[in-house]
Image (spheres, rainbow, N blue to C red):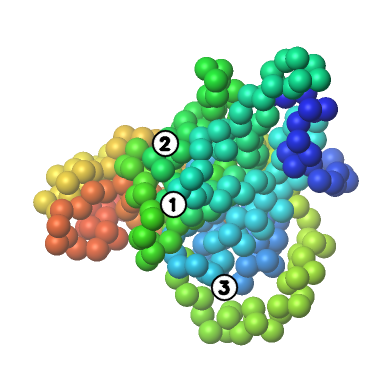
Amino acid sequence: MTDPSTADSDFQQSEHITHTLAPPVTDLNGCSGVAHRLRQRLQAMVRGRNDVIELVIIALLSDGHVLLEDYPGSGKTTLAKALGDAIIDDRPDDDIVTIRRIQFTPDLLPSDVTGSTIFDPNTNRFFFRPGPIFAHIVLADEINRTTPKVQSALLEAMAEKQTTCDNRTRKLDDLFFVVATQNPLDLAGTFPLPSAQLDRFLFKIKMRHIDRQSELEILASIRARKESPGDELPRVTRTEILDSRAVIEQHVHVDARVRECLVDIANHTRAHPQVLQGVSTRALVLMIPALQARAMAQGRNYVGADDVWALAPLVFGHRLALAPGAEAMEEVVRQCCAQPLEALSRA
């Protein structure tokens, strides 16, 4: 990491936010409080997206990454920026900022993401200038508009929370969370994400048009939203999120029958006649903490069949490769889930 005196000012925190030291999160009630505060702030900034907000919170608390897909102007970037604004860095001396946005373009270079080594003529030495990937929340805007070489730089960070530059590997923060966006309709000048990178995203969420009332509320509150609505609402700290992840993992029970159900669903996807490539074992590993986080958000300390039913299309859908002429992705996932979930419900 570079000397703070030589790092560019954009990498430093623009302001120091005073925050009363919050009590440690030690139980599921504390986790529920963290989720509630995140939910309040995001809903104040983003209207008509309560279902998407809930999924983003689940992904954050389960240490996953999210791919938001839809047309321009649907609120993808606003949601990601609101999430970054809801988190306080309670370790301001670590040179890690809360949120950074990377606008992906065809001429982007890997060093534009990871950072680069620069020579300082005043000291006659080289120093590393961190890239925007050194942040708690990274907004990868229009991720499919950059080349595979740049996408691979992000792949290492998402998979291992580290990045390699000039033959040196540097660790990223434990909170590191990627919110990527892409527009599926405009295909000109895009590079489709490879299966290996799609597999690193916990959820792929399609943001559809919001309802009429929510759209009217947005139009009526344009002026108020320019004044940072929700600033009076409490935020959460980095430490609270990391503590919540540990508490959820420890205190939300996952029965052996739930694990058997997940393996059976995976085998059904691999044997389905319309599926060329079924879900990977990594998908099952990533789904366990997501199921635990959803159970906590629903006020339970155990994972049930309804958690699997709710998250399966979001976790498995983008990992399947379907044969030409196959049914819709969600329908195929539902077919593969039906028998294992029925057996789990009877158990």
Q: Left of 346 or right of it: where is 132? A: right
Mark 2–mark 3 Cα distance, whole angstroms, equals 36 Å
Find disc 3 in the rendering and name its residue.
Answer: 48
Element carrying mark 2 = helix
* Residue 344 located left or right of residue 175: left
Report x, y in % for residue 26: 69, 37
Residue at x 41% of width, y 43% of height? 147
Q: How far apart are marks 1 and 3 (CA)?
A: 27 Å
Q: Name the residue under label 2.
A: 149
Q: Along the horizontal axis of the image, is 82 left or right of 248?
A: right
Q: Nearer the viewer, mark 1 or mark 3?
A: 1
- CA neighbours of label 2 inside 10 A, class few (<14), some (14 to 19), many (20+): few
The residue lying at 79 percent from left, 39 percent from top is 9
Element type at mark 3: loop
Measure the alpha-carbon separation of dots 2 and 1.
12 Å
Asked if one can make out residue 237 in the rendered structure from this viewpoint, the answer is no
2 or 3: tag closer to the N-terminus: 3
Identify the residue under disc 1.
145
Residue type at mark 2 is Lys
Q: In this view, does 208 lie above or below 199?
A: below
Outermost residue toward the left in this view: 273
- Label 1 sits on a secondary structure element that is helix
Horizontal and vertical percent position of residue 139: 58, 49
